[in-house]
């Protein structure tokens, strides 16, 4: 989230598209209700199903899953055509006026530089034209300005075309576009609330970019009641992403080096972040300080200037990432031997379950650490039709290690709004369950001892890891949190007065502003710096005062970065530093400094008409055209899902996202509409959380049994009765379910063809208190988003038939 | 710690007044009011309150857990009730249908209780000690790493990667667990490293 849950009360229009907050995030959705009740805000829901969010909406429009980009580009087209643009904002705070290189083109669904063999682009023309001074050339009326190119790019997405692709009736689309476009005034804001309904597509990243572009055009980023608000799933998914527990990340969104970056100097050479416009902050210019401080926190005294801060100890990538799809592909090819699942149930979480079972069966060892008995830990166990395997033929050695759950653990979790909230343990762990920190400590201690005793392959990164905890067997949450915050390793004298110190050895750094690239500071995660400084554990703060009554709560817990509650907040004021909306002030320029209710997202003395609000970009502005930063294009394009009921209307030859990675063998497993005529989607129920709450009696009682949801029309066509048994199958698998026939799903007309939708909720497996059942991953295709490999769970093809003599119950 | 500025102390002082006013206004007769008065302080006085955060979604609702026994005093503590934290700015005391079932999650029959191993080809679990499990896991890791570690690529560049073992980290663990996990996994050279960000 750019903003926070409590900030939603400041909005004028809530757009829920790609999510279902009323059911999936009910206690956060209350802030939508607050905005409606107290501000007269409106709620618009665009979704293939008439969800409970839709049930309380002021306006609902149906859409076919996987066509959000066509809808969003259609709204941008509408705003441009009707001059519903926050012009002052767009001209000053976005890259709309910048000129793009000659040679950049878009035609027939593809941008310049496409290589069909590699399913990838040469992106060299997707960039700005620079002047002799090294700065970007700027001229809004230029035919190759970002604005001119955008206008051309979205022109195809007329209301008629939106109806043809999305199945959204033209009048409904126009009503939504008109409601959204009203938020282009400086005093009206819209918030976007989205979740997996946007991410789990082969073009998920571009769905979100599409809305981010619209929000910029309306001037809604950095303001109260505005923003791009990702409603994240797990309680600490934000934290694990921030901390870089992903193939290609280092904490704080730094990058794991590739093997092309053989030395630290080479690695840093492309990370200079020289400003692209005069006087811009280009905050990533501090990259080296964050990186060196990170390496010091990893390898302590072993990271020295002489060995480039132990840069060689980091693994180097030979491919963009070893994400989960690649990992299971390698496993399937027999190229992986060991796998750890720490609180993760991949057998139900990743696509194409048949492939997953085959992959896990090829492992030598699997270690599962979990508070619950997961399906993954039992992938080798026969559960009849729900897990039909031959245990004797599976040679994997499997360990199941019991861990504590939230109630027995202490530490911080980062919520969607970037608040780090500390919690305390209140219960004794059951049986022999242990904290994950203890388990990781034990594994590390044993591995280290083995390397010290026996030697082996490059032991240094392991044996020299900085593990100076009071009890090396179990680092405490306090020790680890302080390490993430960062500390001073050596006195740093004041250059102007040698009798004074800038930094004192042994102290916690106050924030990342204190970090240095000379080895005198360590910091595990620069964006978390400030969470536990000399003022103490700021994450444990519980002052819930809110002086302006605008939902800021600046003294409750601590939010990254530097306790800032709304990021890009400098953009809440105009080019002279005056708040766009005086009734919802956030920051203002007082002639010499920025002041207000939030921590300024800009240097405190940066003049408003000189320094741009988007300080992480070398331009100082936000990007409507994203240069070469995304693999599949600088603007979003409508691509159909890999399995689609109709061909791509704007580019009929293209299947799926042309830049998505597809492994050998998986393309052959995509189904076609002639064999699998129905458009399926997956979703979650308000009574359940993923695959956990089926272990809880209360939740299992409320939703005990797997079902699929279909329209009355499809039920009639296929002779299916509500409550009767059906078989649903794709090219990759088959499931058996009870049918729930509802009015919540309606057929859509897309490109002249009736499209029926099959809804498949995701909460069942073969462990826990519910009846045994299946999940959508028995059916879904093995392909991900072109940029970050999120699997395409939200749009795929199935067939369905009634099972006339199914079981009685 | 400021979280210990507890509602319990506040309610202890105020409970008599509550029984006389609020409960009466809700329609409790004299007998019910007297009964409520008699159990209310008893319940709070004998339980330990601990602030925590709902383990499910990223709204991160504040919760209060009530336990018999106090961990901080070294006692065995057993949670008997969980409710929304009324002081929390986001959820203001409410919980959703998922969060309302948290107690049943803590006490699920299918909680893992002790380390187990399933040997190759077997169709059953066998209980093992922590030491035996951890020693074996460390040995499996080291043998695989030593055998398959790539110190340099074909061009002679130091790459120090270990691709034959991977790690999925948990998105419901704390930041502190995540950081400890990061250090162990990365220092070993693993690249097949991921979390639930995509699912």
Image (cartoon, coloured by chain):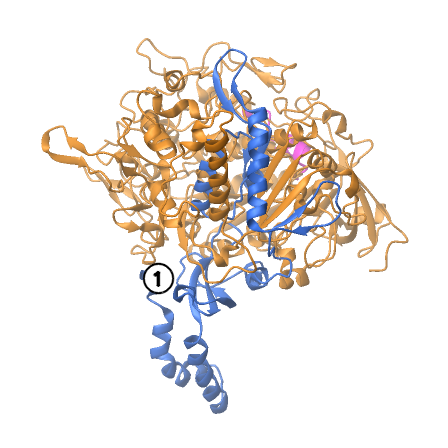
Chain colours: A orange, B blue
Decide if residue A748 is in sight here.
no
Viewport quadrant of the N terminus of chain A: top left
Q: How many other residues sit within 10 Å of disc 1, few (<14), some (14-19) or many (≥20)?
A: some
Magenta span contains residue A162: yes
Percent across and percent down for residue A327 are 62, 31
Left or right? Give the position of A494 relative to B121: left
Percent across and percent down for residue A135 are 33, 15
Percent across and percent down for residue A48 are 66, 43
A112 and A88: which is toward the camera: A112
Left or right? Give the position of A477 relative to A776: left
Left or right? Give the position of A186 relative to B170: left
Magenta span contains residue A270: no
Q: Residue at x 46, y 28 (%)?
A: A459
Viewport quadrant of the C terminus of chain A: bottom right
Q: Residue at x 80, y 57 (%)?
A: A723
Depicted A516 relative to depicted A34: above or below: above
Decide if residue B181 is in sight here.
yes
Left or right? Give the position of A566 relative to A256: left
Percent across and percent down for residue A61 are 62, 44
Looking at the rendering, the stretch of residues picked out in magenta corresponds to A154-169
Residue indicated by mark 1? B3
A593 and A118: which is toward the camera: A118
Depicted A463 relative to depicted B44: above or below: above
View extreme (right): residue? A805
Depicted B35 relative to depicted A510: above or below: below
A617 and A747: which is toward the camera: A617
Toward which corner of the image does residue A658 lie, by quadrant? top right
View extreme (front): residue? A453
Q: Chain of mark 1?
A: B
**Count of numbered marks:** 1
Toward which corner of the image does residue A589 lie, by quadrant? top left
Q: Residue at x 61, y 36 (%)?
A: A339
């Amino acid at each position: 989230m750019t903003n926070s849950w409590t900030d939603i009360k400041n909005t004028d229009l809530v757009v829920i598209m790609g999510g279902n907050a009323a059911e999936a995030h009910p206690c956060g959705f209350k802030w939508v209700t607050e905005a409606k009740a107290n501000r007269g805000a409106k709620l618009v829901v665009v979704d293939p199903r008439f969800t409970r969010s839709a049930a309380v909406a002021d306006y609902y429009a149906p859409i076919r899953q996987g066509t959000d980009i066509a809808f969003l580009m259609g709204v941008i087209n509408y705003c441009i055509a009707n001059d519903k643009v926050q012009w002052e904002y767009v001209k000053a705070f976005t890259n709309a006026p910048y000129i793009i290189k000659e040679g950049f083109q878009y035609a027939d669904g593809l941008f310049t530089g496409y290589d069909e063999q590699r399913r990838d682009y040469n992106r060299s023309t997707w960039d700005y034209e620079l002047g002799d001074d090294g700065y970007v050339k700027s001229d809004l009326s230029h035919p190759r300005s970002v604005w001119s190119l955008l206008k051309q790019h979205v022109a195809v997405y007329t209301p008629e075309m939106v109806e043809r692709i999305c199945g959204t009736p033209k009048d409904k689309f126009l009503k939504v576009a008109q409601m959204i476009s009203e938020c282009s005034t400086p005093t009206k804001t819209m918030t976007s609330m989205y979740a997996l309904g946007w991410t789990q597509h082969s073009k998920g990243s571009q769905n979100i970019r599409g809305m981010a572009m619209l929000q910029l055009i309306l001037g809604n980023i950095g303001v109260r009641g505005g923003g791009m608000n990702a409603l994240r799933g797990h309680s600490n998914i934000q934290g694990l992403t921030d901390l870089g527990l992903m193939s290609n990340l280092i904490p704080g969104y730094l990058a794991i080096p590739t093997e092309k970056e053989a030395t630290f100097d080479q690695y840093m050479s492309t990370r200079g972040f020289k400003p692209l416009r005069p006087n811009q902050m280009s905050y990533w210019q501090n990259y080296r300080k964050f990186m060196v401080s990170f390496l010091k926190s990893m390898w302590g005294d072993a990271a020295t200037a002489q060995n480039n801060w132990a840069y060689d100890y980091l693994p180097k990538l030979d491919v963009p990432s070893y994400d989960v799809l690649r990992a299971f592909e390698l496993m399937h090819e027999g190229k992986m031997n060991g796998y750890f699942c720490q609180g993760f149930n991949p057998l139900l979480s990743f696509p194409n379950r048949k492939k997953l079972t085959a992959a896990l069966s090829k492992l030598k060892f699997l270690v599962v650490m979990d508070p619950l008995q997961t399906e993954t830990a039992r992938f080798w166990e026969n559960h009849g039709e729900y897990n039909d395997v031959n245990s004797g033929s599976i040679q994997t050695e499997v360990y199941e290690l019991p861990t504590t759950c939230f109630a027995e653990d202490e530490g911080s979790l980062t919520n969607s709004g970037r608040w780090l909230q500390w919690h305390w343990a209140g219960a004794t762990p059951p049986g022999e369950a242990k904290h994950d920190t203890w388990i990781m400590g034990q594994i590390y201690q044993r591995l280290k001892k083995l390397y010290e005793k026996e030697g082996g392959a490059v032991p240094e990164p392991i044996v020299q890891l900085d593990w100076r905890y009071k009890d090396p067997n179990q680092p405490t949450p306090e020790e680890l949190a302080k390490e993430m915050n960062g500390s001073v390793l050596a006195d740093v004298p004041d250059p102007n007065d040698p009798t004074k110190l800038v930094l004192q050895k042994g102290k916690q750094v106050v924030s990342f502003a204190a970090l240095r690239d000379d080895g005198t500071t360590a910091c595990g995660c620069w964006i978390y710096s400030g969470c536990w400084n000399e003022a103490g554990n700021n994450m444990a703060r519980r002052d819930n005062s809110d002086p302006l009554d605008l939902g800021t709560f600046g003294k409750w817990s601590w939010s990254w970065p530097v306790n800032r509650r709304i990021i890009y907040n400098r953009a809440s004021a105009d080019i002279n530093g005056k708040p766009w909306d005086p009734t919802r002030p956030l920051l203002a320029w007082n002639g010499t400094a920025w002041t207000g209710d939030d921590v300024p997202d800009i240097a405190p003395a940066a003049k408003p008409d000189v320094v741009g609000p988007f300080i992480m970009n070398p331009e100082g502005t936000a990007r409507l055209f994203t240069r070469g930063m995304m693999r599949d294009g600088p603007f979003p394009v409508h691509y159909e899902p890999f399995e689609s009921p109709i061909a791509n209307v704007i580019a009929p030859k293209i299947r799926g996202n042309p830049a998505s990675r597809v492994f050998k063998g998986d393309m052959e497993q995509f189904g076609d509409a002639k064999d699998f005529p129905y458009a399926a989607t997956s979703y979650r129920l308000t009574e359940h959380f993923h695959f956990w709450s089926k272990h809880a009696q209360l939740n299992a009682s409320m939703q005990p049994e797997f079902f699929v949801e279909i329209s009355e029309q499809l039920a009639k066509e296929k002779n299916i009765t509500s409550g009767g048994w059906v078989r649903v199958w794709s090219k990759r698998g088959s499931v058996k379910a009870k049918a729930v026939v509802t009015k919540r799903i309606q057929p859509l007309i897309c490109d002249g063809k009736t499209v029926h939708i099959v809804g498949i909720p995701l909460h069942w497996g073969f462990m826990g208190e519910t009846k045994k059942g299946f999940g959508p991953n028995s059916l879904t295709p093995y392909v991900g988003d072109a940029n970050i490999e999120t699997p395409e769970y939200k749009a795929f093809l199935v067939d369905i038939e009634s099972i006339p003599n199914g079981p009685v119950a | 710690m400021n979280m210990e500025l507890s509602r319990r102390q506040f309610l202890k002082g105020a409970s008599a007044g509550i029984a006389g006013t609020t409960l009466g206004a809700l329609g409790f007769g004299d007998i019910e009011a007297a009964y409520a008065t008699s159990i209310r302080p008893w319940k709070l006085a004998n339980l330990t309150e601990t602030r925590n955060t709902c383990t499910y979604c990223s709204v991160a609702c504040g919760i209060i857990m009530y336990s018999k026994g106090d961990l901080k005093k070294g006692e065995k503590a057993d949670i008997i009730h969980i409710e929304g934290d009324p002081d929390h700015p986001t959820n203001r005391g409410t919980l959703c249908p998922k969060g309302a079932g948290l107690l049943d999650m803590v006490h699920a029959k299918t909680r893992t209780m002790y380390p187990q191993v399933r040997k190759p080809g077997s169709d059953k679990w066998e209980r093992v000690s922590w030491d035996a499990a951890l020693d074996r896991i460390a040995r499996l890791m080291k043998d695989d790493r030593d055998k398959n570690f790539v110190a340099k690529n074909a061009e002679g560049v130091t790459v120090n990667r270990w691709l034959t073992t991977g790690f999925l980290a948990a998105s419901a663990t704390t930041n502190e667990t995540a950081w400890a996990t990061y250090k162990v996994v990365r220092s070993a050279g693993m690249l097949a490293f991921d979390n639930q960000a995509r699912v």
